[in-house]
Structure formats: C-alpha cells, structure tokens
Image (cartoon, grey):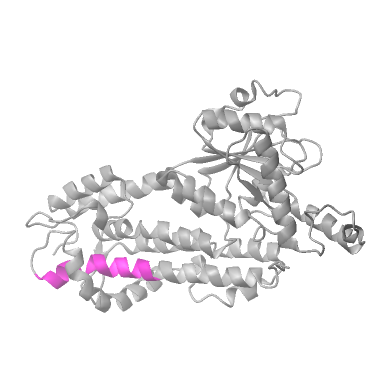
C-alpha cells in the first residue's frame, strides 16, 4: 500500500466513541476523508485539528486589593519563581495600574492577567468590570490575604450574573499558620479564655479548617451562595489547596479549553499529571494519522511509512508538556532547592533535548511487532487494499509508540514530583 493513497471499500463503524473527545464536526470530516480512501486528506484534516487545539487561547483574570498577593499568584500559576524571567512585578505598594497580561513562558496562548486593585484611584466598583474589559477573560481568581470585603463579593456576584466562573483564594496562609503557631508556643491559646473553637493543641489541619470556615461564613453572611475558598501559599504550591484549585479549574473549563490550561499547569500533584496525560491521549490517534499520511516516507528495513520528523516533534512536545526538558527541570530544581542531577536520576525516559530521528526509529522498530495484533482494530479506520497486516501496521505502530512514550514521561513527571516534594509534606497534626 502506498502511504499517500488508500483505495477500496468505505470505512464502516467509525464513530465518535472510537475517536474520543475529538469535536463532533472534526469526527465527521475525518469520516468523510477516510471514507474516500484518501489518507492524505484525512491526515491533513487531523493536522488542522491539532493545529487549532494548539492555538486555543485562555485568559485568566487575577484580581484583589493592593498587597493581597495577586502578583505573586500570577507568577505562581505560571510555574515561575519570584526570580525567574517574565515574573510579575511584586511589591507592597500597588504596581498594577491597568490590566497587564503575562503570557505563560512556554505556552504564550495562555495569558494570566494581573488586574488593578479595585481600591486604586482610577478604578471604582460600579465601573470596574467594564474598565478591565470583562468579556476578555475565561474565568476570574479573586484574592484576599485577610478577609473578602464587600466589593470582592459585589464583583463576584456581577461575574456570576454574566455567566462566568470565579474562585476565591485566601493567600499568604503560611503567614497565618506561623502566627498561630507562635501564639501556641507562647501559651496564649492554652489559657482558659481562649476561643472555644480553637483546638487546645497546635494542629495545622484544624487551623486551616478554621481559616476556611471563617472565610466561607463571611461570604455567606454577605449573601454569597455556596462559596468555595481555596487556601494557598506562594512558598509551597504543593501544600494547602493549590492542587485542589488546579483540579477544579480543569474540571470546570469548557472541554476545548482544557488542554491549554493543563499544559500550562505546574505539576504540584499526581492528579494534575494524570489529568494532563488523559487529555494528551486524545491526540495520539490524530498524531499517528498525520505522521502516516502527510509526506510519509518508507523506513528502511520494515514495512512502515511515516514522517519521522512529525514524530520527533510529538515526543518533544510530550516532554515539554510534562516539564521534562533542561530549562524546565533547572527552574524546578531552583524552586525546590535541589540539585538538577537528583531530578534527572529518577527519570527513565529521555529529556526533550535527547530526542532525535534515530531514537524515534528505534522506538518504532520496537513497537512494530507488537502493533500487528492491533491491526484489526485499525482496519475500522482505514480502507485497505492487499495484505491486511501490511496495510494496518503503520498506524498502530506509531500509535503504540506515542502511547508508550506518553505513559513513560507521565510516570517520570510523577517521579520528579516525588523528589521535589520529599520532606515538604506538612504534618497533619
């Protein structure tokens, strides 16, 4: 079979269940292309779908009073430390006088906007949302370091009326914990006149619950229905509620925006890594189709024709998505105060910089034999002429290679996370 052209009977049984999470209109276009027997046409459509996914923009608005910690949050959600390039300006005095976009350093289509504090002279509550161009943003993060005030709640209610999501974040919770611990150490809270709801002994989780409950009750008292509050500290994003916030943002985004956010998120939990892997898995079939249909070249030594350069880019992309490249690992090592060699030592897959065409050919060769058993499944997707096995081998081979590599880099991301968080887990007592 020539890789650029397939002829024969039309495909039967191709449906959305066999192409998970691909938009319905794209599934129909792929069906039509494959039904004509033209592999190139189908591959071109698959490439268009992938390109569109890479260009989807995501705009995150971060708002709060001056000094609330919103600028710190802007760089934290972009995976940056306070000394990294592209970090937002941080200071006690309000530094943001107009909406300022900070593109993600690796995925510039994801922009985090540092909005001016509503208490600044040029912005007033009744015109604030209009002045900051409310419609531009996909969702809003409302930050406070003490308590949420009336204008925070008023803005949240307006955002809710306009049909967009918002999330309350209580920042600098590490400072609250440090202050509480000092009070316990000084014995103040062990006295008989200590507030009844305070635990008699210092227990971090109980103090966090009390902080969260106080925030929620304050919001409920202001007629905010079913408020959710996430506690965070810029010094350790793996602790408190930041991982839960990440998962919530992903779960509540429209499906076509989800991959953009997941790619940009730092790995502060195993759950985030798993969600990212699951989302990237939905692209593997499309990537396989592109590699086998557009400018495919027969590989010497076995019956596979594919574009190796496309596969090199795909593997490098997976590494980048999981932060497994030299620049990302170096930044992570600095933030965790660990040698980069310690992070690399637990990895079993190559870094992005080590991926070459020779490596891809080696991986394909290893997968070729195992792919034969999957040929019947792939016959549902491609019209075939001649030998069933030889016709069906290229797609399942590239598919299995990409799938295996994705599994490997996701597992490495978890191993690196475990090294970074080793000894940093807070004591539940």
x, y percent for residue 176: 79, 53
Look at 33% across and 47% down and name the residue there.
49
Q: Is residue 148 magenta?
A: no
Among the 4 quarters of the image, the one containing residue 167: top right
Among the 4 quarters of the image, the one containing residue 387: bottom left
Q: Nearer the viewer, residue 18 or 351?
A: 18
Q: Which range of residues does the magenta coloring cover?
A: 387-404
Q: Quadrant of the N terminus?
A: bottom left
Q: Nearer the viewer, residue 185 or 302?
A: 185
x, y percent for residue 15: 21, 53
Counting the numbered discs, the total is: 0
x, y percent for residue 159: 56, 31
- Compared with 170, 204 (above or below) is below
Majority SS type along the magenta span: helix
Q: Is residue 86 visible?
A: no
Look at 58% across and 28% down and name the residue there.
158
* Left or right: 177 as drawn, with respect to 404: right
């Amino acid at each position: 079979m020539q890789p650029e052209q397939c002829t024969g009977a039309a495909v039967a049984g191709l449906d959305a269940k066999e192409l998970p999470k691909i938009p319905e209109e794209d599934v129909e276009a792929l069906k039509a292309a494959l039904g004509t027997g033209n592999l190139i046409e189908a591959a071109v459509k698959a490439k268009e779908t992938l390109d569109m996914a890479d260009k989807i923009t995501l705009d995150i608005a971060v708002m709060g009073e001056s000094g609330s910690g919103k600028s710190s949050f802007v760089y934290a959600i972009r995976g940056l430390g306070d000394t990294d390039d592209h970090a937002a300006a941080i200071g006690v005095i309000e530094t943001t006088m107009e909406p300022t976009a900070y593109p993600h350093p690796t995925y510039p289509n994801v922009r985090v906007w540092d909005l001016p504090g509503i208490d600044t002279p040029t912005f007033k509550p009744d015109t604030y949302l209009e002045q900051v161009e409310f419609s531009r943003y996909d969702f809003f993060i409302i930050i406070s370091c003490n308590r949420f005030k009336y204008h925070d709640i008023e803005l949240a209610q307006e955002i809710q009326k306009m049909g967009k999501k918002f999330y309350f974040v209580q920042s600098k919770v590490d400072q609250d914990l440090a202050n509480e611990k000092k009070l316990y150490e000084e014995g103040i809270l062990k006295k008989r006149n200590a507030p009844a709801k305070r635990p008699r002994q210092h227990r971090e989780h109980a103090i966090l619950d009390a902080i969260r409950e106080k925030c929620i009750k304050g919001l409920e008292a202001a007629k905010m229905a079913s408020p959710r509050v996430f506690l965070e500290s810029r010094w350790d994003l793996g602790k408190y509620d930041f991982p839960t916030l990440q998962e919530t943002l992903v779960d509540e985004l429209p499906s076509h925006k989800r991959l953009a956010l997941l790619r940009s998120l730092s790995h502060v939990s195993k759950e985030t890594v798993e969600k990212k892997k699951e989302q990237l898995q939905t692209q593997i079939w499309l990537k396989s189709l592109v590699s086998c249909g557009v400018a495919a070249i027969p590989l010497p030594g076995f019956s596979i024709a594919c574009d190796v350069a496309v596969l090199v880019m795909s593997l490098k992309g997976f590494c980048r998505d999981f932060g497994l490249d030299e620049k990302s690992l170096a930044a992570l090592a600095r933030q965790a105060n660990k040698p980069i060699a310690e992070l690399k030592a637990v990895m079993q897959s190559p870094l992005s910089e080590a991926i070459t065409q020779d490596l891809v050919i080696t991986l394909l060769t290893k997968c070729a034999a195992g792919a034969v058993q999957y040929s019947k499944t792939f016959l549902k997707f491609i019209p075939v002429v001649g030998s069933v096995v030889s016709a069906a081998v290229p797609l399942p081979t590239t598919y299995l290679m990409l799938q295996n590599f994705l599994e490997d880099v996701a597992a490495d991301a978890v191993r690196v996370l475990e090294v970074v968080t080793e000894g940093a887990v807070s004591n539940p007592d």
